[in-house]
Amino acid sequence: MLVAIKDFGRSPGSMRAWQDTVAAPGELGTPMIGVQEGSDIRLDLNLEAVHEGIFVSGTATVHVVGECSRCLDPLAYDLDVDIQEMFFFEEPVPERGAKEELEDDDEQRLVEHDHLDLEPVLRDAVVTALPFQPVCQEDCQGLCSECGVRLADNPGHRHEVLDPRWAALGGLTQDQEQQET
């Protein structure tokens, strides 16, 4: 997902709107929910030249698919994600003894060969916007932990659970009933 900015130049104050539909890269999500590889991502971005580089802002619209973490029903919906990222022009290496006021290299995005690579920015924005535990409904009851029955389909579903420590006392009542008969 490279955006060419060669014609944009290094003139602070220049702005350009950029809209495009691109294919989603692989592994854009979590194991429970994410964007399918190759699906459409609609980008509506503004590129603004500033003294230090290019500021990118706008939205990305993705189609999210996954499953409910409680009842395992399939989920699918569109998600709008805000994007705001600064791409810095490559700077010459500072001289020895000069103080470096740059942030970690991992956190800085650079304009490389007159191109902006939007894939890492898009990945960061989409994955952090996805729910940690997706649910089909806020009040989803999930599945029965004993037998796996969907609780929304069977209201009032229960299992009698006896504490094994009290099981021996249950035998006493059975013995007494047998003696009376």
Image: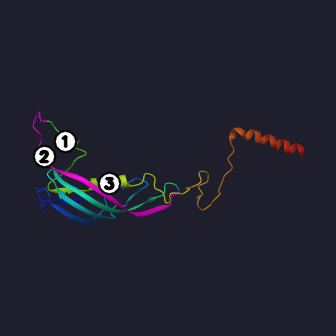
Magenta span includes 104: no
| Amino acid type of the residue that numbered disc 1 sits on in the rendered structure | Leu
| Amino acid type of the residue that numbered disc 3 sits on in the rendered structure | Ala
Left or right, 147 with respect to 119, comes to right
Dot 2 corresponds to which residue?
91
Query: Which residue is depicted at the point 67% across and 52% down?
Result: 159
Q: Secondary structure at mark 1?
A: loop
| Amino acid type of the residue that numbered disc 2 sits on in the rendered structure | Glu
Which label sits on residue 125? 3
Q: CA distance from mark 1 to mark 3?
A: 23 Å
Dot 1 corresponds to which residue?
102
Q: Residues within 10 Å of mark 2 (few under 14, many from 20)?
A: few
Query: Which residue is depicted at the point 69% across and 49% down?
Result: 160
Residue 106: x, y in percent? 25, 45
Q: CA distance from mark 2 to mark 3?
A: 26 Å
Marks 2/1 in contact by CB < 8 Å: the verdict is: yes
Magenta span includes 90: yes
Q: Magenta span covers which residues? A: 71-98
Query: Which residue is depicted at the point 61% across and 54% down?
Result: 147
